[in-house]
Image (cartoon, rainbow, N blue to C red):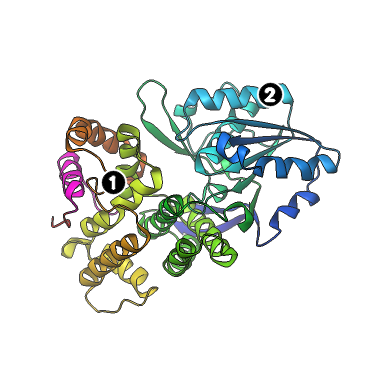
Amino acid sequence: MTVYSEERLGMVWWYFTPNVTFGEDALSELETIVGKKAFIVTDKVINSLGFAEKVCAILTERQWEAAIWDGVEPDPKVSTVKAAAEGIKRFGADWIIAVGGGSVMDTAKAAWVLYEKPEIELHALTPFDELGLRTKAKLICIPTTAGTGSEATKAIVIRDDETGRKFATINPQLTPDIAILDPEFVVGLPKELTAYTGMDALTHAVEGYISVWKNDFSDGCSLQAVKMVFEWLPKSIEDLSDLESREKMLVAACLAGMSFGNSQAALAHSLGHSMGSVLRTHHGMSVGMALPYTIEFNCRGKENEETAKLYLELARMIGIEGKKPETVALKFAGAIRELMTKIGSPQSFKEAGIKKKDFNAGLENMVEFAMMDTSLTMNPRNTDSEEIRKMYKYMYDGTIIDF
């Protein structure tokens, strides 16, 4: 769906979302899809749990041809995407169905590009390229985690085979056609993954609200997503089988995806992407760890008061009151730390089990990669490599940002 947003500096903003079906038995939406051949992209863990086969069964009952490809790894490489695209090409799909978390959905999106337009170089993809998608196939995303929001975004994050650096790119045509949010697909997700992916959703919601590309449509999604994560993430940790809390977190993650997918992520993602590239930390854990530090950094001083006011507005969604924006913003960062303690998400490199020697060995690469990350350009406060390095050092021990 496309909706006109506001006009800024002579530009018209476009707001992209998929068609979303959510709730118990949302998977039955597949029974309404018209097509003949579906290529299901997943990973080995999800495949072993039977989720991909469940999708396949619905389709084959309706005389579809369906194939399952489970070659996705965490933080997928360009070579993985190319392998998936080759599989889609050989099969000749008219629907690509991603069943999995962010890595699976990003792989499916990127493979979709190469299937439709094989001459494209993924690392050179821009928001303005005409991809010609939907000539051969359309895309359905069925998330098995409540966090990445990739089912609702026009973004992909892929890892370079040679350097290991993650690179993110956006293009409006990458927005999936359909997102199916079925709580049965996330019930039983382990506590650690529930926590990490939940922090990913929260980071998307917060950064979508303070990004320099924020807009009225993304704002509404962010505000509701922040409120829902604080209410429902602890409940989903307490009872892994609770369908209501799982459904609410799926919706929160999707809303957060709609927000940052149209306004973009910021500093926490620059820091987190680089942590994952160098230290191979989980994406949700990484950006979640970075989030309160970036709030403390972005809200400091009179020159950052407008950003502090935005954090104040987010803080009010979870019941934090106060008049001075910087003070309330710092309280909001504190509330996020309290949430992380409650759900068991690490708040420092040290708490995450990263050895000091490994941190020191990777520090300069992390700084370099963070400075190259496109999310950095969306942050409301400018920064440089010296401040990035200092932030990482504060993050090692869990020291509150004071600069």
Verify whether residue 395 appears in magenta: yes
Question: Dividing the image into 4 quarters, which one contains the N terminus?
Answer: bottom right
Tell me where the magenta segment starts and ends, as one range: 380-398
Question: Where does label 2 land, which residue?
Answer: 89
Q: Position of residue 289 (x, y in %)?
A: 30, 51
In the rendered structure, which disc, 2 or 1, sits on the residue that comes first in sequence?
A: 2
**Residue at 14% from the left image edge and 41% from the top image edge:** 386
Viewer-closest of 113 and 348:
348
Q: Secondary structure at mark 2?
A: helix
Please indicate whether residue 89 sits to the left or right of residue 345 in the image. Answer: right
**Amino acid type of the residue tagged 1 in the rendering:** Ala
Q: Residues within 10 Å of mark 2 (few under 14, many from 20)?
A: some
Please name the amino acid that badge 2 sits on: Lys
Picture coordinates of residue 179 (x, y %)?
A: 63, 51
Compare residues 131 and 308 and report the one nearer the observer.
Answer: 308
Distance between mark 2 and mark 1 Cα atoms:
41 Å
Q: Which residue sits furthest right?
A: 63
Where does label 1 land, which residue? 352
Whether residue 11 is visible:
no
